Amino acid sequence: MPTLVMKFGGTSVANLDRIRRAAKRVGVEVAKGYDVIVIVSAMAGKTNELVGWVNETSPLFDAREYDAVVSSGENVTAGLMALTLQEMDIPARSWQGWQVPLMTNSAHSQARIEDIPPHNINQKFAEGMKVAVVAGFQGVSPEGRITTLGRGGSDTTAVAFAAAFGAERCDIYTDVDGVYTTDPRICSKARKLEKISFEEMLELASLGAKVLQTRSVELAMRYKVKLRVLSSFEEQTDEAGTLVVDEEEIMESNVVSGVAYSRDEAKMTVVSVQDRPGVAATIFTALSDGGVNVDMIVQNVSEEGITDMTFSCPTDQVARAEKAMNAVRDAGHLEFESLIVDYDVCKVSVVGIGMRSQSGVAAKMFKILSDEGINIKVITTSEIKISVLIDRKYMELAVQALHDAFELDKAA
């Protein structure tokens, strides 16, 4: 039988009624003759609640115990989904990560998938099981402990299963009906894209778009997984949602395909460090070892052999960054005057594969922000994206202005 992977996000399984609705969609695919692997997230809000309990108990927590706690939300959903399907007379059972097994490395809370042996699930399919309901977001380490794949990890689980089982398609069901040019809650003119390239989706996901997790897009691009994003709340058709495809499958596209933003950014400045070889390596090695995900980096102009080093990181990693920097100073490996943190910033980005062949996008972006009186604090670019760090109070204005100026409400 052909295999189909269906992933349901937290809002799609937020309560029993929504689980029943999702189960009916699974039933439709079973009736078409598919063996279905269903990947489920925790019910909406449950992971945040569990993370909150961990942080309240231990702000600098043991990541192994963090995984033990926060992975439990998906277990509940998987069991309820399997029970619901059984009530519909569909042979189904739930699977936790260790039962598959989904093998990961030992990087707790940010584990990476190393292998998904298909034997156990395929054996059950051969015995008559029609649906394997797998708890997303979780796996098992070489030491036999539960691991989690990072926030949004159920998307990565789904794509990895599609690759491991040679699935015909991987459908990601969420609370939006596809990938939009920007967040429709901020910009009413946002337009749903019929297709988007893997590269563009990868940039948008990494820059703050919440539709897909970054690593899931990386996996889909690497293993050529046919990926579709669609809503679990709307009527399903063959044309529903947005297809994430190779660039070659897109005939024409706008120069800019989307505007992304991230509220949860902080700007940190290491004040008065020596301007000499090895200082940057010392700073960012310490941050890396401390589990801090650094994004934008700017080194100020040196004066009398002294400079400032500015970088951005997620707001929830500021405490780790401060601890890492103070530790490296206390150990005598680095001298600096102070560490300044600015929480009132956000990142706004424009993305598009058309930027490869057309100049002037950066100039236009900066002019638009200037006309709105928005000051740029930090800039970073790649071949198909430009990102700026600005004051958070201007975030919605910046997104709307850029969306209008690049005419993203119009198809190519």
Image (spheres, rainbow, N blue to C red):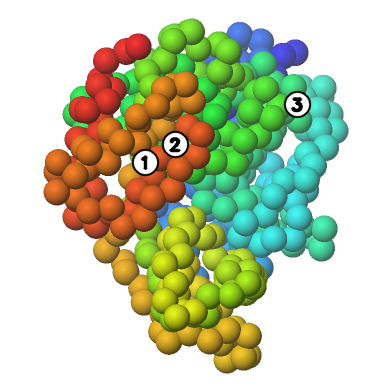
Where does the N terminus fall, quadrant-wise?
top right
**Label of residue 385 in the image:** 2
**Label of residue 401 in the image:** none
Q: Which is more toward the observer, 342 or 386? A: 386
Q: Which is more toward the observer, 202 or 122? A: 202
Q: Is residue 407 left or right of residue 65?
A: left
Q: Sequence-wise, which precedes: disc 2 or disc 3?
A: 3
User: Which residue type does callout 1 highlight?
Assistant: Ser
User: Which residue type does callout 3 highlight?
Assistant: Phe
- Report the Cα–Cα distance between label 1 and label 3: 35 Å
**Label of residue 349 in the image:** 1
- Res 166 → quadrant: top right
Q: Sequence-wise, which precedes: disc 1 or disc 3?
A: 3
Q: Position of residue 149 (x, y in %)?
A: 62, 51
- Label 1: few (<14), some or many (≥20) within 10 Å? many
Q: Is residue 115 left or right of residue 348?
A: right
- Report the Cα–Cα distance between label 1 and label 2: 7 Å
Q: Give the residue drawn at x 67%, y 16%.
A: 168
- Above or below 148: residue 17: above
Q: Position of residue 112 (x, y in %)?
A: 69, 50
Mark 1, secondary structure of its residue = strand
> Cβ–Cβ below 8 Å for labels 2 and 3?
no
Report the number of discs: 3
Residue at which label 3 appears = 165
Mark 2, secondary structure of its residue = strand
